[in-house]
Amino acid sequence: MNIVMAVNKVGVNCLIFGLLWLIRVSATFGNTVDDPEVQAQVTLFNAWIEGQIEYRELPGIVVGVVAGDDLVWTRAYGYANMESKRSMELNTRFRMASHSKLFTATAIMQLREENRLRLDDPVTDYLPWFAYQSAEEDAASITIEHLLTHSSGLPREFSSHWSDFDFPSAIKIRELMPERQAAFAPDVRWKYSNLAYTIAGMIVEEVSGLSWAEYLEANIFRPLGMQDSSVDEPDPLLAVGYGIRRPDSSREVFPFVDARGMAAATGLTSTVEDMAKFVSAQFRQGQRGENRLLSTASLREMHRVRMLESTWTSGQGIGFNVQRREGKLFVGHGGGYPGYTTNTTIQLDSKIGVIVLTNTNDSGPARIARELMDTVGQAVAAALKPEEEQSEWDPAWERFAGRYTSRNGESEVLVMDNRLVRINPWSTSLGEPLQLVPIGNDQFRYEWSTGGGPVGEVIRFEEIDGEVTRMYTGDSYSKRIR
């Protein structure tokens, strides 16, 4: 449906009042639309984001919530062009900036699955001209994985392109690369680098024989049906990009900026609907083929932390930033380009993703994405979550409770609230009891919050003449002593 709402806004220099803001709305929910909590969280988020638009005088925003294979909720707010009053729409294009890196990393992983390269290969195996001024005399060679995990130590940028919008050509990068000075040797610390991903994109081109744009079209856009995405192409449906709000409430209007030789780091243009298709691809399992960009194994590698920040507050996968927040793991990426800031945040366990696209440099999309995830995203996840089957407690399991001993020490199996747990009675602290989750035939699965011990393995009990004599945990056993 489409809804037009008026939002009063203080105008430029406080001379224009009562400016009408158009809020174009489209929502597709499936069964979640009937969930009262989802509706409540949509109302809450809308009230907050409309306040952000009004009081921060933001031009426009498009958001989306992805659940599994579906874009389940999406809305467009404000203007794609403030001067012409062109409203934001769901097919409005945005410069996705550093989201491009996720596509470059995906391309590298696809080529690896085809056995055309390895992540531990030195960059010079594919780009013999690649040279730079090392931070240390005995520094190791930069590998492809170093590029993808921001652990190469290369400088963030190649030139002054963010200041003058004159991005270098591939030829210029190749010619002047030997003059670039690395800040660190490889693997010393996490250091974000657009230059590193520029080099990674050049490897894609060298190995595939295609330009980066051609590769994306054939191997990512087309398989996913991303028909509204492109690389560094002017588009009549592109939102106008605006700079930060000045003290007089005006904003600079930015021209279309071609990333040229750095397209693999920052040149992507897309929409909320196309980005939703890329998010959904992160949840698919199986071997690569059709709408599965990569195998399950490769996706897990991309989403796993490979390089930690020195503060250990977040980490870097292959392409994806990785964060743990309130016990939940999130992967994603942000982007900033002249006139555009964007964010995609994905919660893998619940298969929920949120997308925030804005056409200004001071909107704070990461904060918006977090609020969207914590409201609508989590409500959708709860609404779609199947009811957990509760294993019926069998009072006969009480016979397994008791003290067991092995050469590694003693353990106690207890009955707590109609469930079996296991503790170490000689530990200096109580800690977290281990769960014995019933799986049938008087067998249980060892579950714990961490990967310690034989987590995930089967626990079974040996009985002789009606008496429990041993507890087997995986392949090891303990004797019952009482």
Image (spheres, rainbow, N blue to C red):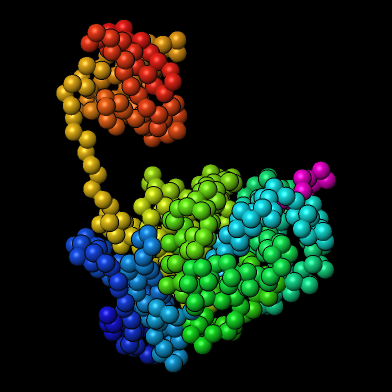
Q: Nearer the viewer, residue 417 or 367?
A: 417
Query: To which quarter of the image does residue 473 belong?
Result: top left
Q: Residue furthest bottom?
A: 84
Residue 298, magenta (yes or no) = no
Toward the viewer: 9 or 227?
A: 227
Q: Position of residue 100 (x, y in %)?
A: 57, 66
Residue 141: say if magenta: yes
| Majority secondary structure of magenta residues | loop
Q: Residue at x 61, y 78 (%)?
A: 232
Which contiguous range is marked in magenta?
Answer: 135-143
Compare residues 134 and 463 and report the one nearer the observer.
463
Q: What is the quadrant of the N terminus in the image?
A: bottom left
**Which quadrant of the view contains residue 66?**
bottom left
How many numbered badges does the structure rendering display?
0
- Give the x, y percent position of residue 134: 79, 52
The answer to whether residue 13 is seen in the rendering is: no
Closer to the camera in the image, 423 or 339? 423
The answer to whether residue 123 is left or right of residue 373 is right
Residue 357 relative to residue 182: left or right: left
Residue lying farthest to the left in this orientation: 395
Residue at 26% across / 67% down in the picture?
Answer: 30
Q: Position of residue 369 (x, y in %)?
A: 41, 63
Name which residue lies at 38% across and 44% down: 327
**Looking at the image, which residue is at 71% across and 62% down?**
207
Q: Is residue 359 visible?
A: yes
Looking at the rendered image, the quarter that the C terminus falls into is top left
Looking at the image, residue 149 lies above or below residue 293: above
On screen, residue 476 versus residue 320, left or right, reads left
Horizontal side of 83 relative to 190 (left or right) equals left
Task: Tell me residue 149's x, y (percent).
Answer: 62, 52
Q: Is residue 79 above or below residue 222?
A: below
